[in-house]
Image (spheres, rainbow, N blue to C red):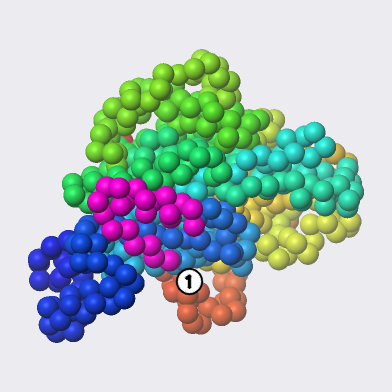
């Protein structure tokens, strides 16, 4: 948003005028039409705060959007501003085909362009479900006006026959038991009713929870905002305070470039590791940082992982849920434990530093959810970065959610050519597979699937599941839901659809995973690989990729190491993180 194209900026309704060739006429017309909605001259003289309203009947996680928008509006008005909500694309994980990730950049573009095109002095971005918060952060980083994030907040847990349940670690665990024949149709039906019983986002340390905590650590959210449950009264108070703060940010001209610094991204990445967060957090924060010309240095991130313990006892790495983290003090409790591992001098949306905000939080109290650094859930960070001839440009593994004995394993590859091929054959009783084998799936990356779906959690073949096999090494160029668990190697780069080595693996090849050594290697000699490379042909184009969004996606999308953002949206790299 930048004045009227002639360098003048007067604020509020007077900025970003519609082009009629006569600015006076444009303002007169705008005010006249705004008055048709009942606004007075006094209303229209106030600073304008846009509110990105992402409510949708296709997004259960945003069910409380109407009351959140109302609370933000209240806060804006108390502080003397004019709140104006506007709709954007909304992405509800389970409703989008083939995957919400295909549309994250669409939401980012939509949000950025509306923030630019509509008159507003600051914007409140309300998101929650997995891709919405990254899309809004990307938009904020690119649009450049004062921006503040608010999330819908996590769901409360449910229960089934006395067992506490939460989405979606327990969704997967129970589905695994059903596949293994331990639960019948009646029982899985009852569980379906009991997993997600309130408004809000998935309440384990999945992508939504991870992104909320990373956003608060980045400094883009009011302190304490990440973990408040969706249905808690504190959530509405947080929304109101966010609205009020947006008015002050507009007056101060506190823009995201002052908050989103390399050190702030390093803080966010540190939190990703310390909470045992979703691997998606790395892809998304890479995309957000990219919008600021900041590259994520994966080698440095891996070193950070070595010195950052997992402290938070939440599923899938631990046992509890986001409502427990809120009761334990939320992000502040984690940051206090990490202390010197964070840069507490980073500026936040409050205009104060992370350290100042931390000092202002209530003193810690006894709790068991955030562990002391001396007694971590896992001694090292949740995510490790791998390299090797199977992943020349890296792959990642969430070691905190893996089976320790499988972190060093050599096995025979059983290859699936695509997610569709996997669905077709994984449960075939005649599938030649044992528990020691390594399941490999390709053509599931940013271009291959397309959209890099959360298909990396390859199911255990039914015949092995029925024998009690709970985990196997699984490798793909896909992503994985942050709620999932297992010894799963993801984001293999370059992806197979662009000719990465994953395209060359054949069933029967041997593969070695050695997480301590950070290696992922295909034990096939280079001459044979060269023969296979020469014979390789790219997959057929996806149906529909000759036009529209899919065409743009296929042309522009970067690999996972580039955050899967679009090339033309990313400025040249000028800095790196972690620092
Ligand atoms: Fe929206 Fe899980 S489905 S956060």
Q: Residue at x 40, y 22 (%)?
A: 362
Describe residue 388's horizontal placement relative to residue 267 as left or right. right
Q: Residue at x 75, y 62 (%)?
A: 423
Q: Is residue 578 above or below residue 551?
A: above
Q: Is residue 94 above or below residue 341?
A: below
Describe residue 297's horizontal placement relative to residue 498 as left or right. left
Does dot 1 land on a helix, a strand or a loop?
helix
Residue 497 point in image, percent of width and height: 55, 65
Q: Nearer the viewer, residue 182 or 59?
A: 59
Q: Residue at x 61, y 67 (%)?
A: 97
User: Is 85 one of the magenta-colored residues?
Assistant: yes
User: Is 362 one of the magenta-colored residues?
Assistant: no
Q: Quadrant of residue 482?
A: top right
Q: Nearer the viewer, residue 164 or 437?
A: 164
Q: Quadrant of residue 368?
A: top right
The range drawn in magenta is 66-87
The answer to whether residue 522 shows anywhere in this view is no
Q: Is residue 147 above or below residue 565?
A: above
Crowding at dot 1, Cα within 10 Å, few <14 / some 14-19 / many 20+, comes out as some
Residue 349 point in image, percent of width and height: 29, 42
Residue under label 1, please give it: 554
Residue ranking furthest to the bottom: 21
């Amino acid at each position: 948003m930048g004045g009227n194209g002639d360098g003048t900026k007067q604020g509020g309704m007077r900025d970003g005028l519609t082009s009629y060739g006569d600015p006076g006429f444009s303002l007169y017309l705008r005010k006249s039409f705004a008055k048709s909605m009942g606004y007075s001259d006094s209303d229209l003289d106030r600073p304008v705060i846009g509110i990105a309203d992402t409510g949708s009947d296709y997004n259960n996680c945003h069910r409380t959007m109407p009351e959140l928008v109302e609370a933000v509006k209240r806060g804006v008005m108390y502080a003397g501003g004019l709140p104006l909500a506007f709709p954007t694309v909304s992405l509800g994980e389970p409703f989008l085909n083939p995957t919400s990730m295909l549309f994250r950049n669409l939401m980012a573009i939509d949000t950025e362009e509306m923030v630019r095109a509509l008159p507003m002095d600051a914007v409140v971005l309300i998101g929650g479900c997995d891709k919405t918060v990254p899309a809004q952060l990307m938009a904020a980083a690119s649009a450049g006006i004062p921006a503040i994030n608010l999330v819908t907040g996590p769901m409360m847990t449910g229960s089934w026959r006395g067992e506490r349940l939460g989405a979606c670690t327990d969704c997967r665990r129970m589905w695994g038991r059903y596949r293994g024949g331990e639960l019948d149709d009646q029982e899985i039906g009852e569980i379906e009713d009991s997993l997600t019983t309130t408004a809000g986002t998935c309440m384990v340390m999945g992508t939504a929870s991870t992104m909320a905590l990373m956003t608060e650590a980045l400094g883009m959210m009011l302190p304490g905002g990440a973990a408040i449950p969706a249905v808690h009264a504190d959530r509405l108070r947080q929304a109101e305070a966010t609205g009020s703060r947006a008015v002050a940010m507009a007056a101060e001209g506190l823009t995201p470039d002052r908050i989103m610094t390399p050190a702030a991204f390093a803080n966010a990445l540190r939190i990703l590791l310390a909470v045992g967060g979703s691997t998606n957090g790395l892809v998304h924060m890479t995309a957000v940082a990219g919008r600021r010309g900041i590259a994520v240095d994966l080698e440095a991130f891996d070193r950070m992982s070595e010195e950052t313990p997992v402290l938070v006892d939440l599923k899938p790495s631990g046992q509890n849920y986001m409502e427990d983290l809120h009761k334990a003090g939320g992000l502040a409790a984690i940051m206090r434990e990490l202390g010197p591992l964070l840069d507490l001098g980073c500026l936040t949306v409050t205009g104060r530093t992370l350290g100042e905000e931390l000092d202002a939080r209530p003193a810690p109290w006894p709790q068991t959810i955030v562990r002391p650094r001396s007694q971590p859930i896992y001694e090292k960070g949740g995510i490790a970065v791998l390299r090797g001839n199977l992943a020349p440009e890296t792959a990642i593994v969430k070691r905190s959610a893996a089976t320790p004995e499988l972190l060093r394993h050599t096995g025979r590859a059983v290859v699936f050519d695509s997610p569709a091929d996997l669905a077709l054959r994984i449960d075939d009783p005649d599938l030649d597979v044992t528990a020691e084998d390594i399941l490999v799936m390709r053509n599931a990356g940013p271009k291959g699937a397309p959209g890099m779906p959360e298909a990396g959690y390859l199911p255990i073949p039914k015949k092995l599941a029925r024998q009690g096999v709970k985990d196997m090494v699984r490798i793909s160029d896909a992503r994985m839901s942050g709620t999932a668990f297992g010894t799963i190697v993801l984001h293999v780069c370059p992806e197979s659809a662009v000719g990465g080595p994953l395209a060359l693996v054949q069933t029967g090849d041997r593969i070695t995973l050695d997480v301590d050594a950070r290696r992922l290697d295909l034990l096939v000699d280079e001459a044979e690989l060269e023969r296979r490379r020469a014979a390789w042909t790219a997959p057929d184009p996806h149906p529909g990729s000759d036009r529209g969004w899919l065409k743009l996606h296929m042309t522009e999308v970067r690999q996972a190491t580039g955050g899967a953002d679009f090339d033309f949206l990313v400025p040249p790299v000028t800095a790196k993180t972690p620092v």
